[in-house]
Image (cartoon, helix red, strand yellow):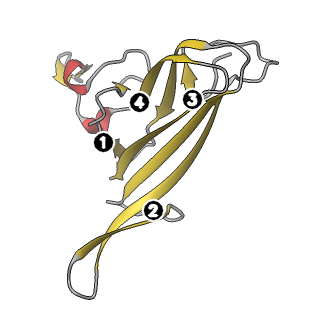
Amino acid sequence: MVIPGVAGFAIPASAQPPLRLTSQTFVERVATDINGHPRRIIATADRPMRGDQLIVILDWRNDGPAPLRNVAITRPVPNGSEPDLDDPVMQISVDGGAHWGRLEDLWLPTPLGGVRRAVPADVTHIRWPLAQAAPGQTGRLSYRLTLR
């Protein structure tokens, strides 16, 4: 069994995944204050709308008794959204997680048998490799999505 949200780490189906993930999602909107200046507002993402910037915060913790090596935290990109790909550590997939890399290195087939360079709207999954996570170690990742 593969841990949901964690790639590259298999465990028995009856065992508790040692890498625990929790996430929070917020929406960032720009509003104009009383003086006409733009202000960023962060709120819970109860009702996100087209064009909204979502901020996703992932907290992870190795709850297992042993260090984890060469695992990756993987998240699907919701349909109708585009991730911000500025994080140099982030790897992306445009084919459901079969192949990984940076956007400029990924290509997709076209209906007429050719290929085209992938664009942000093609991203299906994002992941962050973790070289090692000691028992009890915690970490936090964050990324942005724009709703199309």
What count of labels does the image hold?
Answer: 4
Q: Quadrant of residue 112?
A: top left
Asked if labels 4 and 2 touch by Cβ distance under 8 angstroms, the answer is: no
Residue highlighted by disc 3? 5
Residue highlighted by disc 2? 48
Under circle 1, the secondary element is loop
Which badge, 1 or 4, is on the more N-terminal residue?
A: 1
Q: Give, as a three-letter code, the residue at label 4.
A: Ile
Q: Give, as a three-letter code, the residue at label 3.
A: Gly
Residue highlighted by disc 1? 84
Q: Quadrant of residue 143?
A: top left
Under circle 4, the secondary element is strand
The quadrant in which the N terminus is found is top right
Q: Give the percent coordinates (x, y) of residue 78.
A: 45, 42
3D distance between C-alphas at marks 1 and 2: 17 Å
Q: Is residue 93 visible?
A: no
Q: Foreground residue, 114 or 100?
A: 100
What residue sits 27% from the left and 88% below the top? 34
Q: Give, as a three-letter code, the residue at label 1.
A: Asp
Under circle 2, the secondary element is loop
Residue that lies at the very extreme toward the right in this rendered image: 14
Q: Give the percent coordinates (x, y) of residue 139.
A: 53, 33
Front disc: 1 or 2? 1
Q: Is residue 100 visible?
A: yes
What residue sits 24% from the left and 26% below the top? 103
What residue sits 43% from the left and 27% below the top? 127
Residue highlighted by disc 4? 126
Which badge, 2 or 4, is on the more N-terminal residue?
A: 2
Q: Residues within 10 Å of mark 2 (few under 14, many from 20)?
A: some
3D distance between C-alphas at marks 2 and 4: 21 Å
Which badge, 1 or 2, is on the more N-terminal residue?
A: 2
